[in-house]
Image (tube, helix red, strand yellow):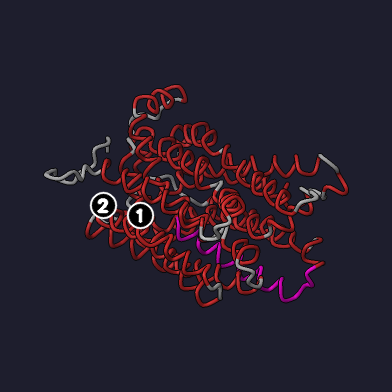
């Protein structure tokens, strides 16, 4: 296969990131409609307990991500990026359909929450390799010297999903009464997601296999992938630390923001949606800019600056917000956190594709990212809810983001060997 033309590369970027779009579309909807879902599937006498059960179900899907990363990641590294990404899309569609169509607890009893949990587990299994597969694909088709810019569109496609979801939620909130929305109206966006999946499947079938994969002399078996993961455990461990900042901050400023705005700050649903919409647009703008900048000045300067600024400002910004909650303050704080997230993500995701050895690139990347998401990012909505309830400190989510930034700051220093007197370089195997 000849080198892809510029137009062909743009088409490939759209096709491969379309799956990321539907993945984040569903994840965001689950977080935004957490209150309605809790009443439909996890009814409890205490509203806090019901919401915690819902966020636990949300987080449980992330526990399947490492499994998907290893099993499906090995499959992608073995059979190819194109075929593997079609399989992940099919699994994702099955999980989405379960969440959309399963009747509530009042109809099915205990079977209802169990089926929803199954849907979340299927989504988690698929998502475990979706992000890694897309990032690796983009890195392998990127033009010379523009890998950061190309890979940034993986995350940017997720922001487009946030924008579409927020707009749809805003429209439904305006058109439907609250009782109707909480009874069945919340399902409408999920139904729409089910309708979008076949279109994305057709689009993704048109993907071409990457030149890098086609030219590879050896494609590892599942056993060889496991051996490669064991051999490069330090690299994958550093990669996990590297993306903690990105996964925690993303779920904090997108999935958790609507719940935080409504349940904690007591802002209106519309105001919370407007803030989320603003965050999605901000992320969409900054991600390719910072990815492109990382191509020019390097990954580590951006990663070092973004994590350091987050450590210094995340908690003070949240304290300022909760001191006098208002739409203007929430927009200002969330846009600042969005800038920090997008700056770091734009450089860190492509950095991870460069750190993981080529023979296990999809599986290794996916495992590092999935472990970070499973242990830290995915449970961010639940952990923030718990922290606020237990401490009474409404700014506690800022502390959680600070901890995540510290972890990734340390990882950046170790990966690039930024010790005094040392020339910055990637320590892990490229």
- Residue 143 in percent (x, y) is at 30, 55
- Report if residue 193 is visible in the image: yes
Q: Who is closer to the viewer here, 172 or 101?
A: 172
User: Which labelled disc corresponds to residue 4?
Assistant: 1
User: Which labelled disc corresponds to residue 99?
Assistant: none
- Residue 351 in percent (x, y) is at 32, 48
Classify 13 as above or below 412.
Answer: below
Q: Residue at x 37, y 26 (%)?
A: 228
What secondary structure is the magenta-colored segment mainly?
Answer: helix
Task: Give the Cα distance between marks 2 and 1.
Answer: 29 Å
Classify 32 as above or below 387.
Answer: below
- Report if residue 83 is visible in the image: no
Chain part drawn in magenta: 155-178
Classify 270 as above or below 109.
Answer: below
Would you identify the image quadrant in which residue 414 lies?
Answer: top left
Q: Who is closer to the viewer here, 197 or 206?
A: 197
Residue at disc 1, secondary structure: loop
Residue bearing mark 2: 300
**Residue 365 appears left or right of 260:** left
Labels 2 and 1: the sequence-earlier one: 1
């Amino acid at each position: 296969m000849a080198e892809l033309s510029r137009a062909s590369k743009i088409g490939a970027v759209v096709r491969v990131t379309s799956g990321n779009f539907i993945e984040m579309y569903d994840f965001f909807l689950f977080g935004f409609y957490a209150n309605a879902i809790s009443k439909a599937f996890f009814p409890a006498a205490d509203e806090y307990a019901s919401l915690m059960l819902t966020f636990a179900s949300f987080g449980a899907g992330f526990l399947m991500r490492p499994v998907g990363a290893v099993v499906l990641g090995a499959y992608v590294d073995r059979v190819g990026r194109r075929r593997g990404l079609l399989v992940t899309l099919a699994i994702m569609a099955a999980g989405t359909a379960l969440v959309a169509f399963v009747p509530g607890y009042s109809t099915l009893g205990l079977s209802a929450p169990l089926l929803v949990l199954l849907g979340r587990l299927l989504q988690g299994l698929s998502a475990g390799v979706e992000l890694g597969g897309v990032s690796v694909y983009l890195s392998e088709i990127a033009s010379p010297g523009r890998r950061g810019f190309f890979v940034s569109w993986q995350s940017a496609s997720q922001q487009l999903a946030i924008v579409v979801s927020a707009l749809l939620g805003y429209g439904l909130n305006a058109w439907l009464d609250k009782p109707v929305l909480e009874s069945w109206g919340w399902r409408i966006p999920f139904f729409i997601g089910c309708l979008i999946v076949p279109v994305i499947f057709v689009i993704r079938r048109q993907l071409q296999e990457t030149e890098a994969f086609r030219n590879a002399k050896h494609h590892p078996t599942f056993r060889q992938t496991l051996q490669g993961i064991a051999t490069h455990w330090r690299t994958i461990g550093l990669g996990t630390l590297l993306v903690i900042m990105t996964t925690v901050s993303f779920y904090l400023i997108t999935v958790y923001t609507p719940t935080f705005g409504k349940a904690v700050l007591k802002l209106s649903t519309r105001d919370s949606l407007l803030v989320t919409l603003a965050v999605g647009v901000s992320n969409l703008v900054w991600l390719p800019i910072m990815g492109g900048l990382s191509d020019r000045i390097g990954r580590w300067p951006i990663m070092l600056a973004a994590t350091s600024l987050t450590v210094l400002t995340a908690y003070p910004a949240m304290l300022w917000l909760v001191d006098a909650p208002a739409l203007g303050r929430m927009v200002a704080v969330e846009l600042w956190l969005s800038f920090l997230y997008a700056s770091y993500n734009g450089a860190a995701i492509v950095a991870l594709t460069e750190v993981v050895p080529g023979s296990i690139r999809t599986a290794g990347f996916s495992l590092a990212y999935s472990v970070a998401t499973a242990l830290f990012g995915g449970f961010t909505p639940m952990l923030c809810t718990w922290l606020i309830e237990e401490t009474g400190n409404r700014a506690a989510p800022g502390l959680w983001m600070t901890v995540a930034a510290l972890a990734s700051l340390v990882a950046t220093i170790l990966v690039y060997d930024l010790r005094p007197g040392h020339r910055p370089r990637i320590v892990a195997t490229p």
